Structure formats: C-alpha cells, structure tokens
Amino acid sequence: MSDASPETLPEALSLTTRTALPDGFAFLLAEFPRPVWEGHPNNGQWCQFWLQRHQMFRDYSAALTDACAQLSDGKIEAQAFHEWFVPRVNFYLGEIDTHHKIEEHHYFPALAQADEKMERGIALLEGDHRVVHDRLIAAHGTIVALDAAIREAAGDVASAASSAAGAARDGIAALGDALGHHLDDEEDIIVPLILDRTEPVLGIG
Ligand SMILES: [Fe+2]
Ligand SMILES: [Fe+2]
C-alpha cells in the first residue's frame, strides 16, 4: 500500500494548480481513448449513468451561469428568473454534494483497490472534491445573497438584483470551472479502467 491520500498530494497536483494530469495517472487512457468509450461493450449501465450525471452537471453549470448573466445585464425579469433559478440551483448544488459522497464512500474505495496504480489517482480526485466543495460553499453564499436581494427588494427590483446577480454568475462560473476540470480528469482516470476490467470485476454497477 502506498501512502497516497489527499493530505500527501503535492500542491502542483491540486485542482487549482495543475493544467493537465501528469504521466501515470490516467494510465489506461492511451489504450482506451475517449473516442472508443461510447459503444464499447464494457461501458456498462453504471458507467453510462455516471457519465450522464457528469454531463448534467456541466449543462446545469452553463445554464445557471447564463441565467445570472442575463439578470445581471437586465435582459430578464427578476421574478421570472427567481422562479426558474431557485429550484434548479438547489438541485444542482445538492446533487454535486450527493455525487461526491457516493464516490468517496462507495466507488473510490473499490476503484483504489483494483490496481495499485489507481491509488494516487483516487487520492488526487478526493483532493479535487475538497476544492470543489470550497467553491460550492462560496457560490452558495452568492446565491443566498441574490435570493435575498430579489425577495427583499422594495421598488426597483432589477437594480437591486443586478450586482448580486453578477456575483452569483461569478460564483457559479468559478464552481463550474473547478468541477468541469475535475470531471474531465476523473473520467480519464476511471473510464479506461472500467473498459479494461468491466464493472462486475471492479465490484461496481
Ligand atoms: Fe468526483
Ligand atoms: Fe464524478
């Protein structure tokens, strides 16, 4: 067993610092590059569902950021925005939290045991979750402030909401940047292992 853990991860590998995965982390990606993932016989139900969740996070991030930008720019009406935005942003943040907990408690331990070369990759991904969580908390703060600005505005709601919407746009975009980077690297580390070993052998799905 190595001592790989989020605590022993070099700063150069943190989600906020690294620009690409160093050699050896996605050690099966050359054998199973992205173009062969879809339709591969070992891309099973679990893997397909998991990739769909990731794409849903990317789509929600883009849509929520865009909605805040439109409100900030005065292109949409605050009450209509509020009705659309609140349930979706609550769902988005809650699902990220749930997704990370399931990965950390169930799937990451199974994948780390599958091959000793996976251990440091899983430690890196757990470290990523901490960065994403910090950005989620920061984004949540901007969303609470925007919600209050719209609900408590007396008179000119558009002007009261505009700067809070700009802050929420930036907070959700910063979360989406970190999350998107994490999802790309997580997929490059994990999907090739699934295609190589199969879900039943790995004990997932
Ligand atoms: Fe993750
Ligand atoms: Fe994930």
Image (tube, rainbow, N blue to C red):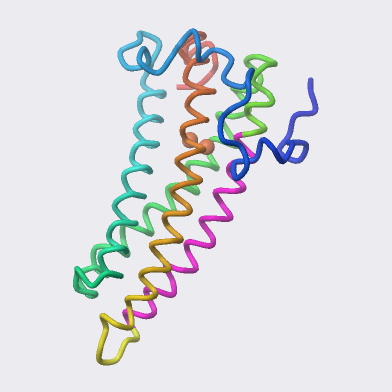
Q: Quadrant of the N terminus?
A: top right
Q: Quadrant of residue 137?
A: bottom right
Residue 42 falls in image quadrant: top left
Q: Position of residue 53 (x, y in %)?
A: 37, 37
Residue 76 against residue 44 in the figure, above or below = below
Classify 25 as above or below 7: above
Q: Position of residue 15 (x, y in %)?
A: 59, 41
Report x, y in % for residue 126: 62, 38
**Residue drawn at (45%, 22%), measured in percent from left and top?**
205
Between 83 and 21, the one lying in front of the other is: 21
Spot the residue most to the bottom: 155
- Tell how many labels: 0
Q: Is residue 4 above or below residue 139?
A: above
Q: Is residue 59 above or below residue 30?
A: below
- At 19% from the left and 69% from the top, the residue drawn is 76
What span is colored magenta in the figure? Answer: 125-151
Magenta residue check for 132:
yes
Would you say residue 9 sits in the magenta stretch?
A: no
Q: In this orientation, which residue lies closer to the viewer: 71 or 60?
A: 71
Rendered location of residue 127, percent (x, y): 64, 40
Determine the image quadrant of residue 128. top right
Magenta highlight: main SS: helix
